[in-house]
Image (cartoon, rainbow, N blue to C red):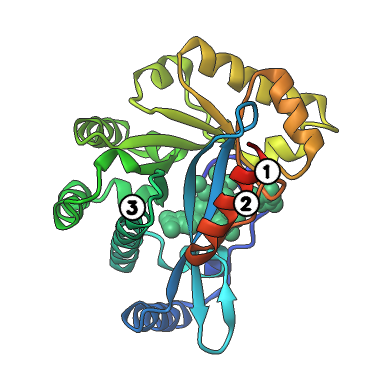
Protein backbone atom coordinates (compact mmCIF):
# COMPACT_ATOMS: atom_id res chain seq x y z
CA UNK A 1 0.00 0.00 0.00
CA UNK A 2 1.09 3.50 -0.72
CA UNK A 3 -0.53 5.40 2.11
CA UNK A 4 1.91 7.02 4.49
CA UNK A 5 -0.27 7.01 7.53
CA UNK A 6 0.09 4.80 10.55
CA UNK A 7 -3.62 4.13 10.26
CA UNK A 8 -2.97 1.86 7.30
CA UNK A 9 0.10 -0.05 8.42
CA UNK A 10 -1.82 -2.79 10.18
CA UNK A 11 -3.56 -3.82 6.97
CA UNK A 12 -2.66 -7.22 5.63
CA UNK A 13 -1.15 -6.76 2.21
CA UNK A 14 -1.40 -9.94 0.14
CA UNK A 15 0.65 -8.41 -2.67
CA UNK A 16 3.76 -8.44 -0.50
CA UNK A 17 3.72 -12.17 0.08
CA UNK A 18 3.44 -13.27 -3.53
CA UNK A 19 6.16 -13.92 -6.07
CA UNK A 20 5.99 -12.05 -9.37
CA UNK A 21 4.73 -15.16 -11.08
CA UNK A 22 1.96 -15.68 -8.52
CA UNK A 23 1.00 -12.05 -8.69
CA UNK A 24 0.74 -12.18 -12.46
CA UNK A 25 -1.43 -15.24 -12.18
CA UNK A 26 -3.72 -13.49 -9.67
CA UNK A 27 -3.94 -10.52 -11.99
CA UNK A 28 -5.00 -12.80 -14.84
CA UNK A 29 -7.71 -14.24 -12.59
CA UNK A 30 -8.91 -10.75 -11.82
CA UNK A 31 -8.93 -9.76 -15.47
CA UNK A 32 -11.00 -12.85 -16.17
CA UNK A 33 -13.30 -11.99 -13.27
CA UNK A 34 -13.77 -8.52 -14.69
CA UNK A 35 -14.54 -10.00 -18.09
CA UNK A 36 -17.02 -12.44 -16.50
CA UNK A 37 -18.75 -9.64 -14.60
CA UNK A 38 -17.87 -10.97 -11.14
CA UNK A 39 -17.29 -7.61 -9.46
CA UNK A 40 -20.04 -5.91 -7.48
CA UNK A 41 -20.57 -2.54 -5.88
CA UNK A 42 -21.96 -2.47 -2.37
CA UNK A 43 -23.41 0.77 -1.08
CA UNK A 44 -23.05 2.29 2.37
CA UNK A 45 -25.37 5.16 3.33
CA UNK A 46 -24.04 8.49 4.56
CA UNK A 47 -26.33 10.45 6.86
CA UNK A 48 -26.69 13.69 8.75
CA UNK A 49 -26.90 12.75 12.45
CA UNK A 50 -28.78 15.91 13.34
CA UNK A 51 -31.41 16.07 10.60
CA UNK A 52 -31.36 12.31 9.82
CA UNK A 53 -31.23 13.15 6.17
CA UNK A 54 -29.51 10.60 3.96
CA UNK A 55 -26.93 12.61 2.04
CA UNK A 56 -25.50 9.94 -0.27
CA UNK A 57 -23.91 6.53 -0.51
CA UNK A 58 -20.35 5.31 -0.88
CA UNK A 59 -19.75 2.57 -3.45
CA UNK A 60 -17.44 -0.19 -2.18
CA UNK A 61 -16.17 -2.90 -4.47
CA UNK A 62 -16.50 -6.64 -3.82
CA UNK A 63 -15.43 -9.63 -5.87
CA UNK A 64 -18.03 -12.38 -6.11
CA UNK A 65 -15.43 -15.07 -6.67
CA UNK A 66 -16.78 -18.33 -8.15
CA UNK A 67 -14.83 -20.47 -5.65
CA UNK A 68 -13.75 -18.21 -2.79
CA UNK A 69 -17.03 -16.37 -2.26
CA UNK A 70 -17.51 -12.67 -1.68
CA UNK A 71 -14.09 -11.02 -1.32
CA UNK A 72 -13.44 -7.60 0.25
CA UNK A 73 -11.17 -5.15 -1.59
CA UNK A 74 -8.16 -5.75 0.68
CA UNK A 75 -7.99 -9.28 -0.81
CA UNK A 76 -7.53 -8.15 -4.38
CA UNK A 77 -6.96 -4.42 -4.89
CA UNK A 78 -3.34 -4.43 -3.61
CA UNK A 79 -2.48 -7.00 -6.30
CA UNK A 80 -3.20 -4.60 -9.13
CA UNK A 81 -1.85 -1.38 -7.63
CA UNK A 82 -0.25 0.68 -10.37
CA UNK A 83 -1.19 -1.74 -13.17
CA UNK A 84 -3.28 -1.16 -16.29
CA UNK A 85 -5.85 -3.52 -14.80
CA UNK A 86 -6.31 -1.05 -11.95
CA UNK A 87 -7.14 1.59 -14.55
CA UNK A 88 -9.70 -0.73 -16.17
CA UNK A 89 -11.25 -1.90 -12.93
CA UNK A 90 -11.47 1.74 -11.88
CA UNK A 91 -13.32 2.46 -15.10
CA UNK A 92 -15.69 -0.43 -14.36
CA UNK A 93 -16.39 1.06 -10.91
CA UNK A 94 -17.26 4.50 -12.28
CA UNK A 95 -19.45 3.01 -15.00
CA UNK A 96 -21.24 0.70 -12.56
CA UNK A 97 -21.99 3.71 -10.34
CA UNK A 98 -23.32 5.69 -13.30
CA UNK A 99 -25.59 2.78 -14.29
CA UNK A 100 -26.81 2.59 -10.70
CA UNK A 101 -27.60 6.30 -10.72
CA UNK A 102 -29.72 5.77 -13.85
CA UNK A 103 -31.57 2.87 -12.19
CA UNK A 104 -32.20 4.73 -8.93
CA UNK A 105 -33.26 7.85 -10.82
CA UNK A 106 -35.98 5.74 -12.51
CA UNK A 107 -37.03 4.56 -9.01
CA UNK A 108 -37.29 8.15 -7.82
CA UNK A 109 -34.10 8.00 -5.76
CA UNK A 110 -31.80 10.92 -6.41
CA UNK A 111 -28.80 10.64 -4.11
CA UNK A 112 -25.13 11.09 -4.90
CA UNK A 113 -22.87 8.05 -5.19
CA UNK A 114 -19.25 8.47 -4.26
CA UNK A 115 -16.68 6.14 -5.75
CA UNK A 116 -13.17 5.49 -4.49
CA UNK A 117 -10.40 6.38 -6.91
CA UNK A 118 -6.96 4.93 -6.23
CA UNK A 119 -3.97 7.31 -6.27
CA UNK A 120 -2.49 5.68 -9.39
CA UNK A 121 -5.84 5.83 -11.16
CA UNK A 122 -6.31 9.50 -10.31
CA UNK A 123 -2.79 10.37 -11.47
CA UNK A 124 -2.97 8.23 -14.63
CA UNK A 125 -2.59 10.43 -17.74
CA UNK A 126 -5.80 8.93 -19.17
CA UNK A 127 -7.95 9.60 -16.11
CA UNK A 128 -9.73 12.80 -17.17
CA UNK A 129 -10.51 11.60 -20.69
CA UNK A 130 -11.81 8.32 -19.27
CA UNK A 131 -14.04 10.20 -16.85
CA UNK A 132 -15.36 12.56 -19.51
CA UNK A 133 -16.09 9.67 -21.90
CA UNK A 134 -18.02 7.86 -19.16
CA UNK A 135 -20.07 10.95 -18.30
CA UNK A 136 -20.81 11.44 -22.00
CA UNK A 137 -22.01 7.84 -22.27
CA UNK A 138 -24.56 8.46 -19.47
CA UNK A 139 -26.01 11.86 -20.36
CA UNK A 140 -29.08 11.25 -18.18
CA UNK A 141 -26.94 11.36 -15.04
CA UNK A 142 -26.42 14.75 -13.48
CA UNK A 143 -22.65 15.02 -12.89
CA UNK A 144 -23.13 16.37 -9.37
CA UNK A 145 -24.60 12.98 -8.40
CA UNK A 146 -21.21 11.39 -8.96
CA UNK A 147 -18.51 12.20 -6.48
CA UNK A 148 -14.99 10.93 -6.10
CA UNK A 149 -13.20 9.89 -2.93
CA UNK A 150 -9.49 10.33 -3.15
CA UNK A 151 -6.84 9.67 -0.56
CA UNK A 152 -5.02 12.60 0.91
CA UNK A 153 -1.81 10.68 0.11
CA UNK A 154 -2.71 10.67 -3.61
CA UNK A 155 -2.65 14.44 -3.72
CA UNK A 156 0.75 14.41 -2.02
CA UNK A 157 2.34 11.96 -4.48
CA UNK A 158 2.12 14.42 -7.34
CA UNK A 159 0.59 17.68 -6.16
CA UNK A 160 0.64 19.50 -9.48
CA UNK A 161 -1.18 16.75 -11.37
CA UNK A 162 -3.61 16.17 -8.53
CA UNK A 163 -4.46 19.87 -8.37
CA UNK A 164 -5.10 20.01 -12.11
CA UNK A 165 -7.27 16.91 -12.09
CA UNK A 166 -9.29 18.16 -9.14
CA UNK A 167 -9.84 21.53 -10.79
CA UNK A 168 -11.07 19.81 -13.94
CA UNK A 169 -13.46 17.74 -11.84
CA UNK A 170 -14.83 20.96 -10.39
CA UNK A 171 -15.45 22.28 -13.87
CA UNK A 172 -17.43 19.11 -14.61
CA UNK A 173 -19.44 19.71 -11.37
CA UNK A 174 -18.10 16.52 -9.84
CA UNK A 175 -17.54 16.74 -6.10
CA UNK A 176 -14.37 15.42 -4.57
CA UNK A 177 -14.00 14.10 -1.03
CA UNK A 178 -10.66 13.80 0.69
CA UNK A 179 -10.65 10.26 2.11
CA UNK A 180 -8.84 9.06 5.24
CA UNK A 181 -8.05 12.61 6.20
CA UNK A 182 -5.48 12.91 8.95
CA UNK A 183 -3.32 10.03 7.72
CA UNK A 184 -1.44 11.90 4.98
CA UNK A 185 0.33 14.79 6.74
CA UNK A 186 -0.51 17.52 4.25
CA UNK A 187 0.20 21.00 5.51
CA UNK A 188 -2.55 23.50 6.16
CA UNK A 189 -1.17 25.79 3.47
CA UNK A 190 -1.42 23.00 0.92
CA UNK A 191 -4.80 21.81 2.12
CA UNK A 192 -6.20 25.31 1.64
CA UNK A 193 -5.48 25.09 -2.10
CA UNK A 194 -7.20 21.77 -2.66
CA UNK A 195 -10.56 22.03 -4.39
CA UNK A 196 -12.30 19.40 -2.28
CA UNK A 197 -15.90 19.60 -1.12
CA UNK A 198 -15.85 17.12 1.74
CA UNK A 199 -13.37 15.85 4.28
CA UNK A 200 -13.66 12.29 5.57
CA UNK A 201 -12.15 11.56 8.96
CA UNK A 202 -10.41 8.20 8.91
CA UNK A 203 -12.27 5.47 10.71
CA UNK A 204 -9.26 4.55 12.84
CA UNK A 205 -9.45 7.90 14.65
CA UNK A 206 -13.21 7.65 15.03
CA UNK A 207 -13.05 4.09 16.34
CA UNK A 208 -10.68 5.01 19.15
CA UNK A 209 -11.95 8.48 19.97
CA UNK A 210 -13.95 7.28 23.00
CA UNK A 211 -10.96 5.60 24.67
CA UNK A 212 -8.08 7.67 23.37
CA UNK A 213 -7.77 11.36 24.24
CA UNK A 214 -5.29 11.74 21.40
CA UNK A 215 -7.63 10.34 18.78
CA UNK A 216 -10.46 12.48 20.11
CA UNK A 217 -8.16 15.48 19.82
CA UNK A 218 -7.35 14.55 16.21
CA UNK A 219 -11.03 14.27 15.30
CA UNK A 220 -11.71 17.55 17.08
CA UNK A 221 -8.88 19.31 15.25
CA UNK A 222 -10.02 18.04 11.86
CA UNK A 223 -13.59 19.19 12.54
CA UNK A 224 -12.31 22.57 13.71
CA UNK A 225 -10.08 22.99 10.69
CA UNK A 226 -12.78 21.90 8.26
CA UNK A 227 -15.09 24.50 9.73
CA UNK A 228 -12.44 27.23 9.44
CA UNK A 229 -12.01 26.36 5.78
CA UNK A 230 -15.79 26.06 5.27
CA UNK A 231 -15.66 22.41 4.24
CA UNK A 232 -18.16 19.86 5.49
CA UNK A 233 -16.66 16.95 7.37
CA UNK A 234 -17.87 13.36 7.58
CA UNK A 235 -16.80 10.77 10.13
CA UNK A 236 -16.46 7.20 8.90
CA UNK A 237 -16.47 4.07 11.01
CA UNK A 238 -19.32 5.20 13.26
CA UNK A 239 -20.12 1.90 14.96
CA UNK A 240 -22.14 2.89 18.03
CA UNK A 241 -24.55 5.48 19.40
CA UNK A 242 -21.77 6.63 21.73
CA UNK A 243 -19.60 7.46 18.73
CA UNK A 244 -22.45 9.31 17.07
CA UNK A 245 -23.10 11.31 20.24
CA UNK A 246 -19.45 12.22 20.70
CA UNK A 247 -19.26 13.38 17.09
CA UNK A 248 -22.37 15.53 17.37
CA UNK A 249 -20.87 17.10 20.50
CA UNK A 250 -17.78 17.99 18.49
CA UNK A 251 -19.95 19.50 15.75
CA UNK A 252 -19.43 16.70 13.23
CA UNK A 253 -22.88 15.84 11.92
CA UNK A 254 -22.16 13.82 8.78
CA UNK A 255 -21.48 10.17 9.41
CA UNK A 256 -21.15 6.73 7.96
CA UNK A 257 -20.60 3.40 9.67
CA UNK A 258 -21.88 0.01 10.73
CA UNK A 259 -23.88 1.74 13.50
CA UNK A 260 -25.96 3.40 10.80
CA UNK A 261 -25.84 0.76 8.07
CA UNK A 262 -23.42 -1.78 6.67
CA UNK A 263 -22.52 -1.68 2.99
CA UNK A 264 -25.29 -3.48 1.10
CA UNK A 265 -26.07 -4.71 -2.42
CA UNK A 266 -27.83 -2.14 -4.59
CA UNK A 267 -31.17 -3.97 -4.54
CA UNK A 268 -31.37 -3.69 -0.74
CA UNK A 269 -30.84 0.04 -0.67
CA UNK A 270 -34.35 1.28 -1.62
CA UNK A 271 -35.84 -0.84 1.20
CA UNK A 272 -33.26 0.42 3.70
CA UNK A 273 -33.94 4.00 2.64
CA UNK A 274 -37.71 3.69 2.99
CA UNK A 275 -37.24 2.15 6.43
CA UNK A 276 -34.83 4.84 7.58
CA UNK A 277 -37.12 7.60 6.36
CA UNK A 278 -40.13 6.03 8.09
CA UNK A 279 -38.19 5.75 11.36
CA UNK A 280 -37.05 9.35 11.27
CA UNK A 281 -40.16 11.07 10.13
P1 LIG B 1 -12.43 3.32 2.65
O1 LIG B 1 -12.66 4.09 1.41
O2 LIG B 1 -11.87 4.04 3.82
O3 LIG B 1 -13.86 2.68 2.96
C1 LIG B 1 -14.36 2.46 4.24
C2 LIG B 1 -14.18 1.03 4.66
O4 LIG B 1 -14.62 0.91 6.01
C3 LIG B 1 -14.99 0.01 3.87
O5 LIG B 1 -14.27 -1.22 3.87
C4 LIG B 1 -16.23 -0.12 4.73
O6 LIG B 1 -16.93 -1.34 4.51
C5 LIG B 1 -15.62 -0.08 6.10
N1 LIG B 1 -16.55 0.38 7.13
C6 LIG B 1 -17.62 1.18 7.01
N2 LIG B 1 -18.19 1.42 8.21
C7 LIG B 1 -17.44 0.76 9.11
C8 LIG B 1 -17.53 0.61 10.54
O7 LIG B 1 -18.41 1.14 11.21
N3 LIG B 1 -16.57 -0.16 11.13
C9 LIG B 1 -15.58 -0.76 10.42
N4 LIG B 1 -14.69 -1.49 11.07
N5 LIG B 1 -15.47 -0.63 9.08
C10 LIG B 1 -16.39 0.11 8.43
P2 LIG B 1 -14.11 -2.06 2.55
O8 LIG B 1 -15.38 -2.06 1.77
O9 LIG B 1 -13.50 -3.36 2.93
O10 LIG B 1 -13.05 -1.22 1.73
C11 LIG B 1 -11.74 -1.03 2.19
C12 LIG B 1 -11.00 -0.04 1.36
O11 LIG B 1 -10.84 -0.51 0.02
C13 LIG B 1 -11.71 1.29 1.22
O12 LIG B 1 -11.48 2.06 2.37
C14 LIG B 1 -11.08 1.84 -0.02
O13 LIG B 1 -9.85 2.43 0.27
C15 LIG B 1 -10.84 0.59 -0.84
N6 LIG B 1 -11.93 0.45 -1.83
C16 LIG B 1 -13.16 -0.04 -1.68
N7 LIG B 1 -13.84 -0.02 -2.84
C17 LIG B 1 -13.00 0.53 -3.75
C18 LIG B 1 -13.11 0.81 -5.14
O14 LIG B 1 -14.16 0.61 -5.79
N8 LIG B 1 -12.02 1.36 -5.75
C19 LIG B 1 -10.87 1.61 -5.05
N9 LIG B 1 -9.85 2.13 -5.72
N10 LIG B 1 -10.74 1.35 -3.75
C20 LIG B 1 -11.79 0.82 -3.10
CA1 LIG C 1 -13.67 5.90 0.79
CA1 LIG D 1 -11.93 6.19 4.27
CA1 LIG E 1 -9.33 3.90 5.60
- Give the spatial CA distance, label 1 vs label 3: 23 Å
Residue 212 screen position, x and y as percent: 82, 30
Q: Which residue is mark 2?
A: 275
- Give the spatial CA distance, label 2 vs label 1: 6 Å
Residue 190 screen position, x and y as percent: 40, 20
Q: Residue at x 42, y 21 (%)?
A: 191
- Mark found first going from the N terminus, 1 or 3: 3
Residue 210 as seen in the image, left or right of residue 190: right
Looking at the rendered image, the quarter that the C terminus falls into is top right
- Give the spatial CA distance, label 2 vs label 3: 19 Å
Disc 3 crowd, CA 10 A, few/some/many (<14, 14-19, 20+): some
Vertical placement of 246 versus 67: above or below? above
Q: Which residue is mark 1?
A: 279
Q: Residue at x 32, y 57 (%)?
A: 106
Q: How many marks?
A: 3
Residue 70 screen position, x and y as percent: 57, 76
Tell me where residue 151 sits by quadrant.
top left
Query: Do callouts 2 and 1 mark residues in contact (Cβ within 8 Å)?
Result: yes
Q: Is residue 199 visible?
A: yes
The secondary element bearing badge 3 is classed as: helix
Q: Which mark is residue 105?
A: 3
Q: Is residue 9 visible?
A: no
The secondary element bearing badge 1 is classed as: helix
Closer to the camera in the image, 94 or 265: 265
Amino acid sequence: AKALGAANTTHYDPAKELSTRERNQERRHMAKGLHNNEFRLYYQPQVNLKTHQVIGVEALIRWQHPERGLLPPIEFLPLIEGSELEFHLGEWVIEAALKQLVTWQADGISLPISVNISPQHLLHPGFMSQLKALLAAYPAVLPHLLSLEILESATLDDMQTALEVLKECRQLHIDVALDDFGTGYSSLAYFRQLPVQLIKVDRDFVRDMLESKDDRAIVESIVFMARKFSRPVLAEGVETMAHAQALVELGCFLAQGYGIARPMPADQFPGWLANWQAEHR
